[in-house]
């Protein structure tokens, strides 16, 4: 065979070229996928708040923002529609009135929209958090997402839980800031081999990522490589044993060690696990941030400090309306 003669390529036996999905089916499929993911994430945020415990885990907003940045096809009208249905249905099925569900959904999606508009301006390297400018942009975007969501949703929370708008704003803002900063980096730094079959349009593959060797097996990893993760686990255990507000800073040195030893994705996963662990420790009462002394005005009532997820709490309250002194029900309007 001469060098100029083209070499015929053969398709391996049993493998047929995949056909692209028809256009009329592509958009409903995207809407369905986004709906299912957001619906499950919203239910997780609602049902992981036990009665009497603090809850600040609401992954739906951060997951939706990460999906729309990494998989550009989900950021179209079909993706937004699926997300809206997921939010509303999860809140409505857990006992929240329809008008409150729509209000909360609008606030959640407005915050996500701001995040998409801000982070889409970044380069792929910045989005993958391999540049310090990308980390700074992520922090600023998290502040913007939390501010917009809290500004639109605090009035609904104030009416539903009887709080002041300032307190409701603080609860919503803190919960959104925590979840975006903890969850979004995991999605943005996720390698393609753990995500979709091909790199999404928003994040083209980096050459250094393609040259990396495959993930080694557990028995091939040197034991000392687990030292930062073990130190982090021990610091979280010390947080429970020692207690107090200062104990929440114990994992910081171990997290810095993890950031020096592991790749961005591994570090992001450990940060997420640490954040969730500390939130759950505070919620379950293993770490007391303040004395429960009514005389000093320190009240650890979880309903006061509960974030902006109204569905489960509204259901547990039994839709009870406040009553006047004569026993007649007082009006409780939603603005």
Image (cartoon, rainbow, N blue to C red):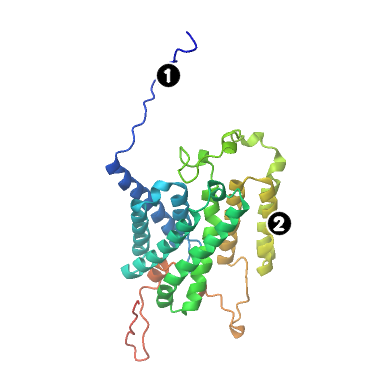
Q: Residue furthest bottom?
A: 326
User: What x and y, as percent, mark residue 37?
Assistant: 41, 51
- Circle 1 residues within 10 Å: few <14, some 14–19, many ≥20: few
Mark on residue 156? none
Residue mark closest to the camera, 2 vs 1: 1
User: What x and y, as percent, mark residue 190?
Assistant: 53, 45
Q: Which residue is mark 2?
A: 253
Q: Quadrant of the C terminus?
A: bottom left
Circle 2 SS class: helix
Q: Earlier in the sequence, mark 2 or mark 1?
A: 1
Using the image as rendered, state which of residue 240 and residue 307 is in the foreground: 307
Q: Locate residue 38 relative to residue 181 in the image: left or right.
A: left
Residue 264 visible in this rendered orientation of the protein: yes
Circle 1 SS class: loop
Establish if 60 lies above or below 30: below
Identify the residue at horizontal 69%, vertical 48% (top origin): 260
- Circle 2 residues within 10 Å: few <14, some 14–19, many ≥20: some
Occupied quadrant, residue 90:
bottom left
Mark on residue 9? 1
User: Marks 1 and 2: in contact by CB < 8 Å?
Assistant: no
Identify the residue at horizontal 66%, vertical 50% (top origin): 259
Establish if 294 lies above or below 138: below
Q: CA distance from mark 2 to mark 1?
A: 55 Å
Identify the residue at horizontal 45%, vertical 57% (top origin): 117
Residue 52 visible in this rendered orientation of the protein: no
């Amino acid at each position: 065979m001469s060098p100029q003669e083209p070499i015929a390529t053969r398709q391996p036996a049993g493998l047929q070229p995949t056909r692209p999905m028809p256009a009329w089916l592509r958009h409903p499929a995207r809407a369905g996928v986004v709906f299912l993911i957001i619906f499950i994430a919203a239910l997780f945020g609602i049902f992981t708040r036990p009665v009497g415990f603090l809850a600040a885990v609401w992954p739906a907003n951060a997951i939706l923002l990460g999906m729309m940045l990494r998989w550009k096809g989900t950021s179209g009208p079909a993706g937004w529609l699926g997300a809206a249905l997921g939010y509303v249905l999860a809140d409505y099925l857990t006992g929240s009135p329809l008008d409150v569900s729509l209000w909360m959904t609008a606030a959640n999606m407005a915050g996500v929209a701001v995040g998409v508009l801000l982070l889409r301006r970044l380069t792929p390297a910045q989005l993958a958090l391999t540049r310090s400018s990308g980390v700074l942009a992520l922090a600023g975007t998290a502040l913007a997402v939390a501010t917009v969501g809290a500004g639109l949703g605090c009035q609904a929370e104030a009416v539903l839980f009887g709080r002041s708008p300032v307190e409701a704003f603080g609860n919503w803002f803190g919960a959104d800031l925590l979840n975006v900063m903890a969850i979004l980096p995991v999605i943005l730094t996720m390698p393609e081999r753990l995500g979709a079959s091909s790199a999404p349009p928003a994040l083209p593959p980096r050459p250094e990522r393609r040259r990396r060797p495959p993930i080694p097996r557990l028995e091939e990893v040197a034991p000392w490589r687990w030292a930062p993760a073990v130190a982090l686990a021990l610091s979280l255990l010390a947080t429970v044993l020692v207690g107090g507000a200062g104990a929440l800073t114990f994992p910081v040195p171990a997290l810095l060690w993890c950031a020096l030893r592991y790749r961005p994705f591994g570090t992001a996963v450990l940060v997420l696990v640490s954040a969730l662990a500390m939130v759950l420790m505070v919620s379950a009462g293993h770490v007391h941030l303040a004395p429960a002394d009514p005389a000093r005005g320190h009240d650890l009532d979880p309903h006061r400090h509960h974030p902006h997820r109204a569905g489960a709490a509204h259901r547990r309250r039994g839709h009870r309306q406040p009553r006047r002194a004569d026993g007649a029900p007082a009006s409780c309007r939603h603005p």
